Image: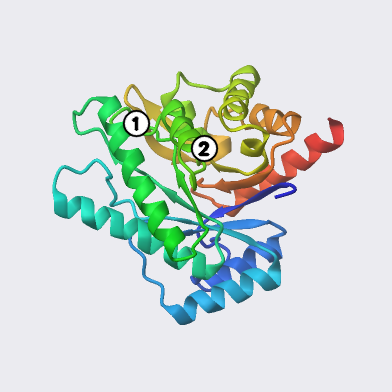
């Protein structure tokens, strides 16, 4: 990817119809560059719809990602729950690929009281199994474990980058709001630059050339994330993060998860473009 693209997590609120294809067209009308298809409550998209979505995305030039269902825990103790988790991830990846998506984002696991090192190894093994199955099907979609916002959830920045460095077919989904809530209230240019340096250190320049970033304001407490906020209603220093992304020449997708979706996506894009002019 040769630039940083901005878009929304799901169909923009201003779309005339709540459908993925119409949402992609609306993204293009707004002058945004990407959209994440939200399968978070389950993958409910038929083959005819996937073909339509792929056609609209190609025609508009809008880049797509998908978000796998929330009901996934690759550290599940119950064999049936684990099997269902793996199938949900595979289904999201298969449907996403038919839509033309490049990436499937996933909340990988909960610790459930288990030692972090054991959970890491289980998650790694199960993601390797998923990638292997997809490659057998000639599906090249990237699986992106997400940096999470609560201490009970597997997915610190270190854990995610280690997984991606050690496992083919994985790349990180860096939720900067979750980082802000979880990783010591990261909220300044030096801290954002250190995150990008960590990405480059573990994944090389290629890691910065194909970022997938979730972006929003966030309400947080002692245990991390509570809820998302619109950027201007939060304490999140988004201008400093955009400066760091500019200075590191980052490329990829920035997906806005604020409640107002496209409004904050447009704010981010406009701010970033102004920073490019002044930088």
User: Quick one: SS at disc 2?
Assistant: strand
Which quarter of the rendering shows the C terminus? Answer: top right
Residue under label 2: 174
User: Quick one: SS at disc 1?
Assistant: loop
The picture places residue 227, in percent across and down from the top left corner, at 39, 39
At horizontal 56% and vertical 47% (from top left) the residue drawn is 256
Q: Nearer the viewer, residue 183 or 47?
A: 47
Q: What number is the disc on residue 150?
A: 1
In the displayed structure, does residue 206 sit left or right of residue 221?
right
Q: How many marks?
A: 2
Tell me if mark 1 has few (under 14), some (14-19) or many (20+) residues whose alpha carbon lies within 10 angstroms of its own: many
Q: Nearer the viewer, residue 36 or 268?
A: 36
At horizontal 26% and vertical 29% (from top left) the residue drawn is 118
Task: Report if residue 213 is visible in the image.
Answer: yes
Q: Is residue 252 above or below residue 51?
A: above
Tell me if mark 2 has few (under 14), some (14-19) or many (20+) residues whose alpha carbon lies within 10 angstroms of its own: many
> What colouring style does the render use?
rainbow
């Amino acid at each position: 990817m040769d630039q940083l693209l901005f878009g929304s997590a799901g169909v923009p609120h201003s779309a005339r119809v709540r459908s993925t294809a119409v949402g992609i067209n609306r993204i293009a009308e707004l002058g945004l560059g990407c959209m994440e298809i939200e399968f978070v409550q389950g993958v409910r998209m038929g083959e005819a719809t996937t073909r339509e979505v792929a056609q609209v995305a190609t025609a508009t030039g809008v880049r797509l990602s998908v978000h796998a269902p929330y009901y996934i825990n690759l550290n599940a103790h119950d064999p049936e729950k684990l099997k269902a988790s793996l199938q949900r991830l595979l289904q999201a990846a298969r449907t996403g690929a038919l839509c033309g998506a490049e990436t499937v984002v996933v909340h990988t696991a909960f610790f459930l009281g288990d030692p972090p090192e054991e959970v890491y190894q289980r998650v790694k093994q199960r993601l390797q199994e998923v990638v292997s199955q997809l490659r057998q099907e000639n599906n090249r979609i990237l699986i992106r474990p997400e940096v999470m916002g609560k201490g009970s959830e597997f997915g610190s920045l270190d854990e995610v980058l280690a997984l991606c460095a050690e496992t083919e077919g994985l790349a990180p989904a860096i939720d900067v709001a979750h980082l802000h809530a979880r990783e010591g209230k990261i909220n300044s240019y030096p801290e954002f630059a250190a995150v990008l340096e960590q990405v480059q250190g573990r994944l090389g320049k290629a890691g910065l050339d194909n970022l997938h970033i979730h972006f929003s304001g966030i309400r947080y407490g002692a245990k991390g994330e509570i809820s998302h906020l619109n950027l201007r209603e939060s304490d999140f220093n988004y201008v400093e993060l955009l400066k760091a992304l500019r200075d590191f020449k980052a490329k990829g997708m920035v997906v806005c998860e604020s409640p107002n979706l496209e409004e904050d996506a447009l704010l981010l894009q406009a701010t970033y473009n102004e920073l490019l002019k002044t930088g």
